[in-house]
Amino acid sequence: MNTPQETRNERLAATLIRHLKQRHYDAYYCHDTNELLEKVKSLIPEGSTITWGGSDSIRSTGVTTMLRDGNYRVFDRDEATTDDEKVAIYRKAFECDYYLASANAISEDGVIVNIDGNGNRVAAITWGPKHVVFVVGLNKVCQDVDAAIKRARSVAAPVNMARFNLNTPCSKDGTCHDCKSPDSICNYVSIQRMSHPAGRHIVLLVGEDLGY
């Protein structure tokens, strides 16, 4: 028997999936990370070329480890030993069959919001790879687009600043100052209304708290 939280998650996911499909995404709900790993495996054919952004969600769930250990051609930015190697993998993303990412926030009606420091992640999400797979915990769901942008700026960005140990006002007090710091990671804001061409983007909603 479902707990109240599980019931709410299933109902929220069903609502989101309906809106996402209206926006031409493929979308699925995974109750937990075990279901997520099986879904990723079923969606990505063996032999595919794959890379990913800096998402904590895809790493913490074991998705990246599974893909590295599987029969895929993986370009892993985490294995780069120099900045030049990392940039080369950033550029390689545009040629890949699959690019994996998360979202900083998603509105209840299916608009995806991401904030990026270098722009490589939002660039690849927007154009290039044949398919983009979003792994999104239900903790990222916000009431509307304004709330999603606020979550990205006031929750995700300060946590990521602490994660990367960069020097901005939010890294000191945990709140957004709409700063113009050279270290800011709020340089590129992506508000994605729909998937184009239809089905290029796949959203995997997960009934757990993932990422920031």
Image (spheres, rainbow, N blue to C red):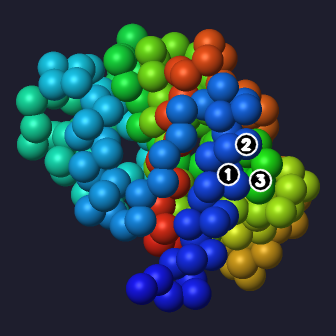
Instruction: Look at label 1 and name its amino acid.
Output: Leu
Which residue bears the numbered disc 2? 19
Instruction: Tell me, yes or no, whether the two marked residues, 3 and 2, touch with CB atoms within 8 Å.
Output: no
Which residue bears the numbered disc 1? 16
Q: Position of residue 10 (x, y in %)?
A: 56, 66
Q: Can you see residue 167?
A: no
User: Is 166 displayed left or right of 30 in the figure?
Assistant: right
Q: Is residue 5 above or below residue 40?
A: below
Instruction: Tell me, yes or no, whether the two marked residues, 1 and 2, touch with CB atoms within 8 Å.
Output: yes
Q: 54 or 172, which is in the foreground?
A: 54
Question: Circle 2: is it few (<14), some (14-19), or many (20+) Cα within 10 Å?
Answer: some
Q: Residue at x 23, y 40 (%)?
A: 41
Q: Tag count in the figure?
A: 3
Q: Position of residue 186 (x, y in %)?
A: 73, 49
Disc 1/disc 2 C-alpha distance (Å): 5 Å
User: Is 210 displayed left or right of 83 in the figure?
Assistant: right
